[in-house]
Image (cartoon, rainbow, N blue to C red):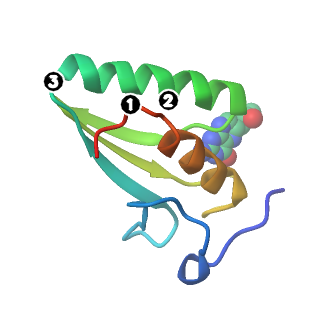
Amino acid sequence: MAKLLDLDKLESLPAKWQAGKDGKSIVQEFSFKSFAEAFSFMTHVALLAEKADHHPDWSNSYNKVRIALSTHSAGGVTEKDVALAKAISNFVWLPQ
Ligand code: H2B
C-alpha cells in the first residue's frame, strides 16, 4: 500500500495546491472562461486519472472545478496524489 505523507511536510507540491481542511487531501480550485473550458479540462484529467488508476474527488459549477486528491485506500495523501497534482499542473493551457 502507498505510504501516507505528512501534510505539514509536503515539499514538492506544485504551485497553488494546498492541504485540504479535512487533513487528508490536497486541493485546488481552477477557474476557466466558460463551462466548455472547464469540462474540457475535466475530460483531460479524467483520462490521466484513468491511466494512473488514481481518481480525483471533484466538483464542477459552471466555470469552476474544485479538485481534492486523496488516496482512499491509505486514508490520506500519498505520492500518488502528488504525482497526479503534478500531471494536472503540467497542462500547458491552464489559466494563470
Ligand atoms: N483513487 C483514489 N484517489 N484512491 C484510491 O484508493 C483508489 C483510486 N483506488 N482509484 C483505486 C481506484 C482502486 O479502487 C482500484 C481497484 O485500483
Tags 3 and 2 in contact by the CB under 8 Å rule?
no
x, y percentage for residue 66? Answer: 32, 45
State the CA–CA distance, disc 3 to disc 2.
17 Å
User: At 48% from the left edge and 23% from the top edge, which residue is drawn?
Assistant: 44
User: At 15% from the left edge and 29% from the top edge, which residue is drawn?
Assistant: 33
79 sits to left or right of 43: right
Q: Is residue 71 visible?
A: no
Q: Which label belongs to residue 93?
A: 1
Q: Quadrant of the N terminus?
A: bottom right
Q: Which label belongs to residue 45?
A: 2
State the CA–CA distance, disc 3 to disc 1.
14 Å
First in residue order: circle 3 vs circle 1: 3
Which amino acid lies under the numbered mark 3 shown in the image of this protein? Ser
x, y percentage for residue 58? Answer: 39, 40
- Give the structural element (helix, strand or loop) at label 1: loop
Dot 3: few (<14), some (14–19), or many (≥20) neighbours within 10 Å?
few
Is 74 situated above or below 53?
below
Q: Which label belongs to residue 34?
A: 3
Instruction: Please tell me in which quarter of the rendered image ligand 1 is found.
Output: top right
